[in-house]
Amino acid sequence: MRKVYLIIALSMLMVGGIYAQQLPVFTQFPSDELLFNPAVAGTKRIYDIRLDYRKQWVGMTDAPTTEGLSLNYRMMGGRMGLGGYFYQDHTGPTQRNDYTLCYAYHLKLPDLVVSLGIAGSMMEYLVDGSKVIVHQQNDPALNLAMTSHAWSPEASAGVYMYNDRWKLGLSVTNLLSSKENLYKSYPSPQDTNLSGIVGLVSHFNGYISYNFSGNPNYVWQSSIFVTQTTAVPLYLAYSLRVHIKERFYVGLSYRVKDAIALDLGMIFQGRIQVCYSYDYITSPLGNYTSGSHEVTLIYSVDSFSKHEHRGDTFDEFQRRKFGYMF
C-alpha cells in the first residue's frame, strides 16, 4: 500500500495529473456550482453562504480531504453578483489552497437570465517532505527535510443561463495554466538539482440541470456535470434528486467508472439546508476503501432581518413555477 500512497502523491507533481488531483471532486455538484463556474455568483438569494467538507476513500491512509467556504451576494436589483470561495485540498504530503474572487453580470430576458462571470485566483501549493516515503534515501527529487510551497495566479470564466425550469453552465478554469515552482530555496547552494514544477492545466466544464414536476410538492431535479482536460478521460457525473414539499430531498448520483452515491438534504426555516452524501466506490479502488463522505451546509436568505425584505425583480421569476431550491 505504501507504493499506492506514493504514486498518488507524486502524480500531483505531474502536468496533466488525474482530474481528482488537479481540482476537487464534489458529489453534491448541484449544490456547489460556484466552485466550477464564476458566472453563478449572485444567482442565488441575496446572501448565500456554503460550507463543504469531503472525506474521500475512507480507510486509506493520507486519502484526499477537502474543506471549502463559498460566499454569494446579489446586488443592483439582481443585475450583478459578487462571490468568492476558499478551499483546502489535502492528499498525503501535498496541500492545495485556492483563494478566488468572482464577479458576474446578469442579463434578464423575458424567460431567461444570462450571467457572464470572471474570476481571479491565487493558488498555493505545499509539499511536506517529512511525510514522503522514498525507497532510496537522499533522493534528489525531493527534499525530505523541508516543506516547500509556491504561489501562482489563476483565472477562470464562464456563462450561466437559467430560469425556473432549467440551468445551463459552461466554464473554463485554470485559464492561465500557471506553473508553481517548488524548492526555490535549498539548504545549501549546491543543491540546485532540487526542483519541482507543478503545472496546472485548463479544465473545460459543462453543467445542465432540468426541473420537472406534475405536483408542486414533488420536484425532480436532474443534473449532469462534465469536465475535460488534457490527456485525461472525460469526467462525467449524473445526479437525480426529488425535492419534497421544499423541506427535504433524496437522490442518487453516478460518476462514470467511479462511484454511485446516496444524496440526502434537509431544509430548516426556509433558509438553512444540510446536505449529506455517501459514495460507494465502483472502481477497483473500492477494494481498499469503504467509500467517501461529503457534507454541505447552506445558509441562504434575502435579508438578515425577519421584518425586512430586500428582494428584487428576480424573486417572482425564481419562484414562478417550482419554488425556490437551494
Image (tube, rainbow, N blue to C red):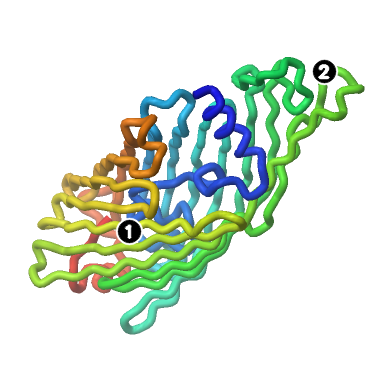
**Residue type beneath disc 2:** Pro
Residue 192 in the image: x percent, y percent? 87, 28
Residue drawn at point x = 52 percent, y = 49 percent: 19
For the point 63% across and 45% down, the residue is: 122
Q: Position of residue 15 (x, y in %)?
A: 67, 47
Residue under the point 45% across and 70% down: 115
Q: What residue sits right under mark 2 in the picture?
A: 187
x and y percentages locating residue 319 in the rendered image: 22, 68
Q: Secondary structure at mark 2?
A: loop
For label 1, the crowd category at 10 Å Cα-Cα, with few meaning under 14, some 14 to 19 and many 20 or more, is many
Q: Depth check: give the residue in front, 2 or 55.
A: 2
> In this image, 263 relative to 89: left or right?
left
SS of the residue under disc 1:
strand
Q: Tell me if I can see residue 272 in this picture.
A: no
As drawn, is 85 to the left or to the right of 301?
A: right
Q: Which residue is mark 1?
A: 238
For the point 73% across and 25% down, the residue is 142
> Which residue is situated farthest in the right direction here?
190
In the figure, is residue 76 to the left or right of 100? left
2 and 1 marks in contact (CB < 8 Å): no
Residue 270, horizontal then vertical, whole percent? 19, 51
Horizontal arrangement in the rendering, residue 210 relative to residue 62 (left or right): left
Q: Tell me where residue 150 sits by quadrant.
A: top right
Give the mark nearer the N terminus: 2 vs 1.
2
Q: Amino acid at mark 1?
A: Tyr
Q: Residue furthest bottom?
A: 110
Find the distance from the CA under tag 2 to the CA under tag 1: 49 Å
